[in-house]
Image (cartoon, helix red, strand yellow):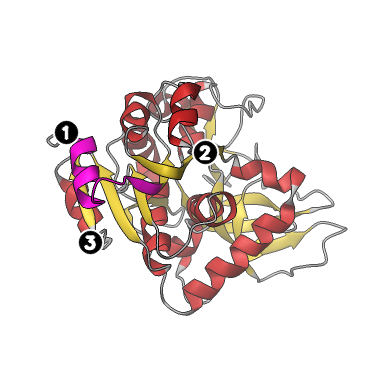
């Protein structure tokens, strides 16, 4: 089969190379799938660079999230069968940027109401957004949510889920087309951080209170502004630090305003509390069945376009999600 493999660590566009390798055989608790669509995620970029917490041995095939058709099952697999369409994460080093990949046996059924591309992006971003807003922050419908990087993959998911829940949403984006994307997501207030005073606009939109729940996948200087925007007894949920500098909040400020800082490492629930992931999938699948989830997919890449897509993602130039299809 054909696959994109990382044979030496480098920037993504230089790291991945097309290779011909055998189809991966599933282990006892794994399934082999024909890749229908694979989503591009920031962990793929970090793996190519050797900067992710999971560091597979070289060579490996990246592509941590996908939708696939089951083509073979491991000896202990009982929850799915050949021919099933499933979604979830890949078993690295046999990732989704190939014609065939491996996935865990507990991979979830793909919602019938979503096509392959939409189903491929339902797991990581939407599960992260759901767990952050509803499991960690216990978001109530009468609260105001502020989403940093609202036109990105996980940010756009957070905006959609908060709007479905009936919340007022303030979206912070980085100019131009990203402003338009946030408006298409029906955010109530859109703030262009490149041209506006973020803190003043948030205060104006909340009658001076600030946001009850803040969703931050960026960190760095962006977090420093967000800390000035949180309401009394509000919650800031940290889901990443794509801005490069890890959040380091002054705890005296937390004390003075009585707010909480919550962390979310979604993947850790697999080990510590898998029931949270199962509940998240059930909630998201129900929303998809009702036609309420509409993933923001800005690009559908053919086989040879993967390096350019990863480079765009690494540079922060993408809006919503990019997906890759081996058959395109």
- For marks 3 and 1, give the one nearer the viewer: 1
Is 240 above or below relative to 162? above
Q: Mark 1 = which residue?
A: 194
Q: What stretch is highlighted in magenta?
A: 198-212
* Residue extending farthest bottom: 290
Q: Residues within 10 Å of mark 3 (few under 14, many from 20)?
A: few
User: Could you say where residue 19 lies in the image, as x and y percent from the top left?
Assistant: 53, 36
Residue extending farthest to the right is 76
Does residue 39 appear left or right of residue 106 in this picture? left
Q: Which residue is drawn at 61% across and 32% down?
A: 60
Front-lying residue, 70 or 111? 111
Left or right of residue 328, residue 171 in this image: left
- Asked whether the viewer can see residue 69, the reply is no
- The image shows residue 239, relative to residue 171, as above or below, that is above
In this rendered view, identify the residue nearer to me: 155 or 19: 155
- In the rendering, at what x and y percent does residue 81 appear? 74, 70
The one of 326 and 22 positioned closer to us in this rendering: 326
Residue 184: mark? 3
Secondary structure of the residue carrying tag 3 is helix
Q: Mark 2 near mark 3, Cβ–Cβ under 8 Å? A: no
Q: Give the label, 2 or 3, closer to the camera.
A: 2
Q: Is residue 17 rendered magenta in the image?
A: no
Q: Pick whichever of labels 1 and 2 is earlier in the sequence.
A: 1
- For label 1, the SS is loop
Q: What element carries label 2?
A: strand
Sequence-earlier tag: 3 or 1: 3
Q: How crowded is mark 2: few (under 14 residues within 10 Å), some or many (20 or more)?
A: some
Asked whether 209 or 124 is in front, the reply is 209
Up-down: is 28 above or below 13?
A: below
Residue under label 2, please give it: 260
């Amino acid at each position: 089969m054909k696959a994109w493999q990382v044979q030496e660590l480098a920037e993504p566009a230089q790291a991945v190379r097309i290779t011909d390798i055998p189809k991966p055989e599933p282990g006892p608790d794994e399934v082999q799938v024909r890749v229908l669509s694979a989503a591009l995620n920031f962990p793929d970029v970090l793996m190519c660079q050797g900067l992710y917490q999971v560091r597979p041995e070289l060579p490996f095939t990246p592509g941590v999230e996908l939708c696939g058709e089951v083509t073979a099952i491991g000896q202990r697999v009982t929850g799915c069968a050949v021919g099933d369409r499933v979604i979830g994460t890949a078993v690295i080093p046999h990732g989704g940027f190939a014609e065939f990949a491996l996935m865990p046996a507990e991979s979830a059924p793909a919602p019938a109401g979503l096509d392959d591309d939409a189903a491929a992006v339902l797991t990581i971003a939407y599960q992260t957004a759901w767990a952050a807003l509803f499991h960690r922050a216990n978001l109530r419908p009468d609260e105001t949510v502020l989403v940093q990087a609202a036109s990105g993959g996980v940010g756009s998911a957070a905006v959609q889920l908060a709007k479905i829940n009936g919340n007022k949403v303030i979206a912070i984006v980085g100019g131009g087309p990203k402003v338009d994307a946030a408006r298409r997501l029906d955010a109530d207030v859109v703030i262009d951080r490149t041209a506006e005073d973020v803190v003043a606009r948030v205060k104006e939109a909340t009658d001076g209170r600030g946001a009850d729940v803040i969703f931050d996948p960026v960190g760095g200087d962006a977090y420093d502004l967000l800390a000035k925007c949180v309401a009394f007894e509000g919650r800031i949920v940290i889901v990443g630090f794509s801005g490069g500098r890890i959040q380091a909040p002054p705890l005296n400020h937390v004390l003075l305003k009585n707010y909480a800082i919550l962390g979310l490492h979604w993947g850790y629930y697999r080990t510590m509390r898998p029931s949270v992931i199962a509940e998240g999938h059930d909630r998201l699948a129900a929303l998809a069945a009702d036609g309420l989830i509409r993933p923001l997919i800005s690009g559908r890449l053919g086989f040879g376009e993967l390096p350019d897509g990863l480079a765009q993602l690494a540079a922060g130039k993408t809006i919503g999600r990019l997906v890759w299809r081996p058959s395109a």
